[in-house]
Image (cartoon, grey):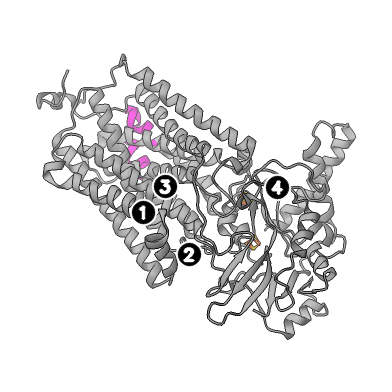
Amino acid sequence: MMIQQQTQTPDNPAFYPALAIGGLISAIGVAAAFYMEHMGHHVSGMNNQVFWGLPHVFGIFLIVAASGVLNVASIGSVFGKKAYKPRAPLSGLLAIVLLAAGLAIIMLDLGRADRVLIAATHVNLTSVFGWNMILYPVFFGLVGLYVWTLMDRSMNRYSKAAGVSAFIWRLVMTTGTGSIFGFIIARQAYQSAILAPMFIIMSFAWGLAIFLIVQETMYSRANMELHPQLRARMKNLLGVFVAAVFYFVVVYHLTNVYYAKQTEFVHFILVSGGIFPLLFWGGFVLMGTIVPLLLLYVPSFSETKGSVTAASFLVIAGGLFLLFVFIIGGQAYPLDMFPGMQVSSSFFDGKIDSYTPSLPEILLSLGGVGIAFTGTLLGVRVLRFMPQDDAAKLKSAGYLHD
Amino acid sequence: MTEPNDKSRRGFLGVAAVGAAGLGVAAIAPGFHLIEVSQAGAPGAGVSNKVRWGMLIDTTKCASDCNACVKACNTENGITETVKDPRQGSQWIRKLDLKDPKSGLTHSLPMLCQHCEHPPCVDVCPTGASMKRADGIVLVDRHTCIGCRYCMLACPYKARSFVHIPLTEQNPEVPRGQGCVESCTFCVQRVDKGQIPACVEACANAEHNAMLFGDLNDPNSEIAQRVAQVKTTQVRADLKLNVGVRYQGI
Ligand code: SF4
Ligand code: SF4
C-alpha cells in the first residue's frame, strides 16, 4: 500500500526554541568538561576510590539504551512484525544519537580528553574497552546503512540484510558494554557472568522507554494519536522488559549471595549501605519497576492518557538509579584484600567511601542528554523519521487531528 | 605483547630525538619530547626477560609506627603536591594496618603495586599505556594514558592513583601528569642504574630491614633463596596473578 509521508510540520514554532535549549544544555556540558579537564578532576566529586562517577552512570546508560532503542527496528525487520516497520528509521536515528551522546560524555570525562585520538589509534585488543573502540564505530556504520536502506526506496531490498547485521552487532555491543564490568575479577560487585545478558535486557527496557517518549512527543506535535492497538502492544512490550530486568537483577544478587559468597557486599548494597539501598529500593524497585508496571497494567491507569509516557520516564529514572547503585556502590565498597581481617590505612582501605557529584559532573552528564535531545530534534527535522503509519487510516479512524 | 612495542617506541623516540635536535626544533616541542626521551633512555639498557624483579616484605619486622618507605617514595618520585581532599591524592605506597578480629593479632605492612605477572591493569587498558616490561616491572606510559581509570577498576590492590590536580616541580626522571593514572614503578629509574627502590633503601636505613628487593628468577639472589625457604604469601593468591611482591608473616 502506498503510504502517505507525514513529516514534522516545518513551521512548528516550538522547533527553534527547543533547538536553542538543547544546544545550550549541550554547550554547558562541554564547557563543564573543559573546566574539569583544565582544573583537574579535583573539582569533581570523584577520588581515588570512587573514580567513575555520575558521567559514567549517564554515559553508560545512554550507550546501553542506544543499543536497546534499535530493538523497535529489529522487531519490524528481523522478526517481521509489520506495525514496527514504519518505526524502524526513528529507532535507527535514536540509536545513533544516543550512542554518540553516551560516548561524548565518557570521552569528555577522560583525564586527558585531548588524547582521544590515541584511544582510537592505539587499540589494545585484550581490553574490553579496546574492543568497544571497534564495536562502536561499526555500530554507527551498520545502523547508518540500515537507516539508508529504509529511507531510500532504491535501497529497500537490502534493508532486511542491513537490519539483521545491525541487530546482531547490537547484541555484541551490549555484551561488550556489560563485559566492561564482567571482566573485573578484582571486585565483589562485578565478577559475574550474568552481567552481559543483564545488560542486554536492560538495554531493551531503557531503549524502548526512550523510544516511546520520543514517539509520543512527535505524534502530539503532529496532532496525531497512536493507534490504540499499537499503543497497547508497545506498552505491553515495555512491561515485559521492565519485569525481565527486575528478574535479572534479582538473579544477579542471588548468585552473588549463594555462589560467589559475597554476602557482605550484597548486604551493603541492599540493606546497610545508606544511600545505595535507598536508591535501589526506592529508586529502582519502587519508582523504576513497580509504579511503571502498575501504570502499564492496571486498567484504570493504563487507559489514561500519558500513562505510557509517565511509565517510560520512570523506567529511565529507575535505570539511572540502578546504574548508580551498580557503578558507584561497587566502588564505594572497599576491596577485600585480606579476607577476615580488619584493614585501615591512610588511603582509606577497609573504609566505605562516599561520593557526591559536583556541579561540573552534573552539567556534563546533563550535557550528554542535551546532545541526544538536540541530535534527535535535528534528525527528525531534516529527514522523514516520523513513524509512517498509514496517515489516511489514522485519519479515518479519528487519530489524526488537523 | 608490550615488549616489542616498547622497543620500537624507544627506537622511534631515539630517532625522533636525534632528528629534533638536528633540526634544532627541540625548543618548539619542550616538555613532550624531552621528558619522553629522559624516560625512554633509561629503561633501554638491559631490560631482559631473564630477570623478574620482585620484593619480599617481612611483616614481622615492619613497625606499625614507621612510615619511612612512604616518605622515601614520595621524595624519590616527586609526589609532593598537596591535595585538599586526601582521597584525591596519589599514594604509590601506603602502610596498611591489619587486625584479626578473632585473635586480636595485628600486622603492619606496606602495600604497593604488586607488579603482577598477569596484570589486570595491562589487560584492560584500552590504549596499551599500562604495560609490563620484560623484567616484570609494570608501568604506565604517561604519554599514552588517556585517564580513563579502567585500570583502577581492574587492580585488586588499589595500587593506582589518578592525578587530580595540575603538577609542578617534578623529578625529571619520573614524569607524572595531571589527568593520568600512575602507580609504583619499583623505582625503575634507580633499578636501571643498578640501585634498589627508594622504599627498600629507606627501610634498611631505618634499621627495620623489612623489605628485600631482587631478581626472583636468579636462584642465587637473596630474595629467591628466602622465597624458597620460608612460607611467603601472595595477597589475593586466589586471583592467580603471580604477583612480584611477596609477604612473609601474615
Ligand atoms: S598491582 Fe595493580 S597496578 Fe600493579 S600490576 Fe597488579 S593490577 Fe597492575
Ligand atoms: S587510565 Fe591510563 S593506564 Fe589506566 S587504563 Fe586508562 S589509559 Fe590505561
What residue is shown with label 1? A278
What residue is shown with label 2? A188
Residue A72 shows in the view? no
Residue A148 shown in magenta: yes
Alpha carbons under labels 1 and 4: distance apart: 35 Å
The structure residue drawn at horizontal position 64% and vertical position 42%, both measured from the top left corner, is A118
Quick check: A278 above or below B54? Answer: above
Q: Is residue B113 left or right of residue A328?
A: right
Q: Residues within 10 Å of mark 3 (few under 14, many from 20)?
A: some
The answer to whether dots 2 and 1 both sit on one chain is: yes
- For label 1, the SS is helix
Front-lying residue, B176 or A374:
B176
- For label 4, the SS is loop
Q: Is residue B65 left or right of residue A305?
A: right
- For label 3, the SS is helix
Evaluate if marks 2 and 1 touch, with contact meaning CB atoms under 8 Å apart: no
Magenta range: A146-164
Mark 2 C-beta to ligand 1 under 8 Å: no
Q: Nearer the viewer's eye, disc 3 or disc 4?
A: 4
Alpha carbons under labels 3 and 2: distance apart: 29 Å
Residue type pointed to by label 2: Gln
Q: Which mark is residue A395?
A: none
Q: Nearer the N terminus, badge 3 or badge 2?
A: 3
What residue is shown with label 4? B82
Q: Nearer the N terminus, badge 2 or badge 1?
A: 2
Name the subunit of mark 2.
A
Residue type pointed to by label 3: Trp
